[in-house]
Image (cartoon, grey):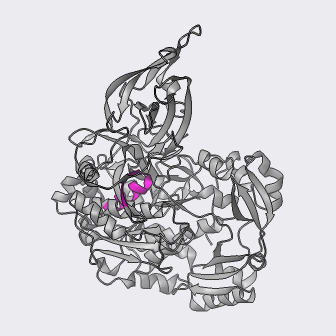
Amino acid sequence: MFQVTRRNSPAVLACLALLLSASAFSQSASSRTSPNTQMLGAEDPSKLITVTVWLNQHNKAEMDKAVSEMYRAGSPTFHHFLTREEYRSKFAPTAAEAAQVKAYLAAHNFAVTSVEKYNHYVVAQGRVGDAQNAFGVKLNRVSMQGAVHRVSSGAANVPGAIGALIQSVHGLNDFAPRPTLARQFNPEMGKPVSAALLGATELKASAAAATTCLNGVQTVHFTTNGGFPKATYSGNRYGDDTNFSCPGYTPKEVQTAYGLNGVYNKGWDGTGQTIVIVDAYGSDTIRQDANIFSSIYGLPALTGANFKIYYPGGKVSCAASKNCGSWNTETSLDVEWAHAVAPGANIALVVAPDANSLDIAEFWAIENPEVITNYANGDLGYQISNSWAGFEILDVLFGGQSVLKTEYAMTELAASLGISANFASGDWGDNVQLILNDFGISVPPSVVMPASAPYATGVGGTSLFLNSNNSIQFQTGWGNNETRLSYPDPNPPYDPPLHLGFIFGAGGGTSAIWPKPAYQKSLGGSNRKVPDISYIADPYTGVNVIVSIKGTTYLEVIGGTSLATPMFSGVWAITNQAAGSKAPLGQAAPLLYSLPSGAIKDVLPVDNGHDVQGEIFNPPAPVLVETARELAAPLENTTQFLSALYHGSSSRWYDLTFGTDSSLVTRPGWDDVTGLGTPNGLSFVNAVVAAAP
């Protein structure tokens, strides 16, 4: 069984010790949680629960060594990936072992609902009381910011011979991964900016070129009914008086910005490759929406020949599910922008019936390609795009390390078969504020899984500003703060300005669990760092997406590492195409760290010298001078950023910052916001192909 390692920082150790039992929660959580987090007591023992019991692989040490050698340049087995037959005969669990696990579950009153056909997991339904007896845990109810969650006192513990067969048990906790898309935030309403109905005007506007987000320098004056307080602010202007925010970028604009036209001119557009996309719930109108998108932007249509949908857990309807949430928009974003980057590639959309089943769907996409007969080399695809994430530290705190073990094994299996499992690094910066807001728990900076798994490729995000010819004007790490400067019309100023603080930004940092892989040997520390690579993700410099909801079609401007991930997966499909007989290239991350200068554009902090600053006059008080740094606060570790005046979707004015990502910092070389940087078009593709054996 894989043994996890941990950093020895006191903050992390304190978190890891938390909630190992109900008593630990009640005794120590008060100092680490908000008043809105309360222990409610034991879970109802008669309540039904669904668990997935994952079985141990065989010869695990041998497999670990074999996969490590596959990714060590100079090794005799460098890029000599396993076939599925080799894997199954040597490393997969057996039917006899699965039968023993089934019998154990039945003896504890569980009804087995399915067994993976290669015996990797058994899904069963039973009652909470039976789960506690079967797995040696206590299940409790905790109210976190008003939402009630089921948490486990620890990881499952099954004694004896049966326990030796079991790697992990999922479902004891009810934390589920979430999609990593982000919409422009409307601070006036405390929610995302509303999508536009798709009509003739929107169609024409969305297809237009020359989207610019920064529009010169502007000075604005505010008074209070013509009197005091008065304020004057000057700096970059984000948007303009016609478009309060930045209209979404089009495929043509993004393709030009990232140097993809040179790649397409070589005949490399993903033809012959398949991008696998794993989402929960899916979208009932995905082909319709993607083909509207394709028609607007001159992309090939998605047909039964180049686009297929698979439902490994049974067909599901997003519209019929009360828990679908943003997954339909997530699905549209993933499909449309993978297609925008690699228009010649096939797309295989693998849909999980719910967010708790994403690991099963991912595993199916990795391990079950024989359902496909007409895609590359009989495989479902050599790149899997995953725009979803769970919080590494929550799994540790609440007895969910078994989930982490499964996701490690899952990504290792993908790497062993020559597949790059690409995962979003998250949209919540260092996760400190989000976990406090959503769960009422105070934690140190942390990362998301599965992006932090050593055999995953973690994809971070940037803010992207273009010139009128679609070349890059500025690009920096994605992270936004907002400060409110004025009230609504007639715009009396705030005195002092109201700091709304960090909104969102690319996730990244150091894993508390996984040791540093060999390909990151040049980076400091002893643990895995994320992300590895990045693309555009800031919704304030986002892209256009077509999505239908309840029969109405909308044009939305979307960002998030959910955008960066399918874009990178599209580029990796193109790179596999260019590699020809060298394909598959396997996990992307190890190759990324070996590329020569120029293959990846380093993303740097940006300050064009016109950050917003101002003065507030309110006699007899002295003039209040607001520097750019003071207006942009809280800056935490950031020293260089870009800020702009933002009129927003209301009549209020704001200072909007770029490159302020919680405690994470964009800097030269690898950083915890953008990783190594963004792929540099044809230079990137050529360098990766040259690095492959």
Give the residue at x 37% y 37%.
Answer: 244
**In the figure, 539 relative to 453: above or below?**
above
Spot occupied by residue 445 in the image (x, y as percentages of width and height) = 60, 46
* Residue 357 lies in quadrant: bottom right
Which quadrant is home to the C terminus?
bottom left
Most extreme residue toward the top, as rendered? 620
* Quarter placement of the N terminus: bottom right
Q: How many marks?
A: 0
From this viewpoint, is residue 518 visible? yes
Residue 398, relative to residue 108: is it above or below? above
Residue 250 position, x and y percent, is 28, 51
In percent of width and height, residue 162 lies at 70, 84
Residue occupying the point 46% across, 45% down: 673
Residue toward you, 485 or 569: 485
Whether residue 342 is visible to the viewer of this picture, yes or no, is no
Q: Position of residue 74 (x, y in %)?
A: 38, 64
- Indicate yes or no whether the magenta region holds residue 561: yes
Is 577 colored magenta in this rendering?
A: no
Magenta stretch in the rendered image = 553-570
Against 218, is 471 above or below? below
In screen coordinates, is 36 left or right of 629? right
At x 43%, y 37%, the residue is: 648
Q: Is residue 549 above or below residue 535?
A: below
Residue 580 occupies quadrant:
bottom left
Q: Residue at x 55, y 36 (%)?
A: 501
